[in-house]
Amino acid sequence: MKSKVITTLLASIGLFVAAGAAQAQTAGERVYVIDQRGEVVMSGAGLCWRTGFWTPAAAAKDPAGCKCDKDLLPKEVCEPMVAKAAPAAAPAAKPSGDKITVAADALFDFNKATLRPEGKAKLDEVVAKAGAIKLEVIIAVGHTDRIGSDAYNQKLSERRAAAVKQYLVSKGIDANRVYTEGKGKKNPVTKPDQCLGKTSPKVIACLQPDRRVDIELIGTK
């Protein structure tokens, strides 16, 4: 069964909740990331962000469990809520998402995780966008091409995402509002029948779209 949520979140989530949430909460009370208004933080794709304390049993007790994980919970948990639901109130303003995909080659040299001057200029644009909204969270997800082992590319994608966070924080973004994740070579943009052949400058250039960092800004204007 396909999950509707993103399962990976760094341990720094606890710091964000403690610093930014409008109401105090403990790990045993909530298993989803909560913003300053007490709302579940959603990605631009409409997916809930889980904390490291998430389990199906805990989600069944969380107020947002049916909203985020209805297909994973027993029917008796969510269906009574639907049947007894009061008339819907006027919807509150929801955070909007702005997803920016930056080519990793624009940020880093090939096979490196140190930001280039041109990469810093790209991230300055992200900082400017963040300053134009009431920022809730920034999510940076690193990706690599297929060259190299799974383990190596996973670490490289994580280091690149961490380098992005470090720079954003150096420009005044609250560290507790920046989440990072590495996907390694799991989500390529290129197709299996593209960029064929052994590693060569031509193949490396062809695989460039896979080397990227997805940066998502979530907040209200």
Image (cartoon, rainbow, N blue to C red):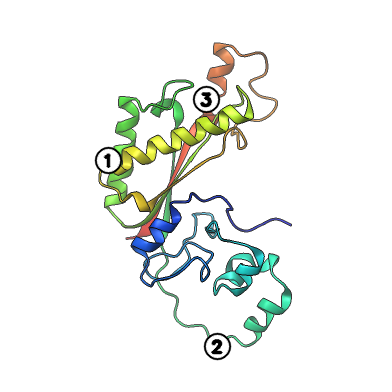
Left or right: 183, with 75 as reference point: left
Q: Nearer the viewer, residue 108 or 180?
A: 180
In the picture of the structure, the residue carrying the numbered disc 1 is 170
| 2 or 1: tag closer to the N-terminus | 2
In the picture of the structure, the residue carrying the numbered disc 2 is 86
* Residue located at (36% from left, 70% from top): 22
Give the spatial CA distance, label 3 vs label 1.
28 Å
Could you say where residue 196 lies in the image, as x and y percent from the top left?
67, 18
Mark 2–mark 1 contact, CB under 8 Å?
no
* Residue located at (42% from left, 38% from top): 162
Q: Which mark is residue 140?
A: none
Q: Examine the image and state in which quarter residue 35 appears.
A: bottom left
- Kind of residue sitting beneath label 2: Ala
Q: Which one is closest to the eye, mark 3 or mark 1?
A: 1
In the picture of the structure, the residue carrying the numbered disc 3 is 208
Q: Secondary structure at mark 1?
A: helix
101 over 118 or under it: above or below: below
Is residue 56 among the parts visible in the rendering? yes
Q: Secondary structure at mark 2?
A: loop
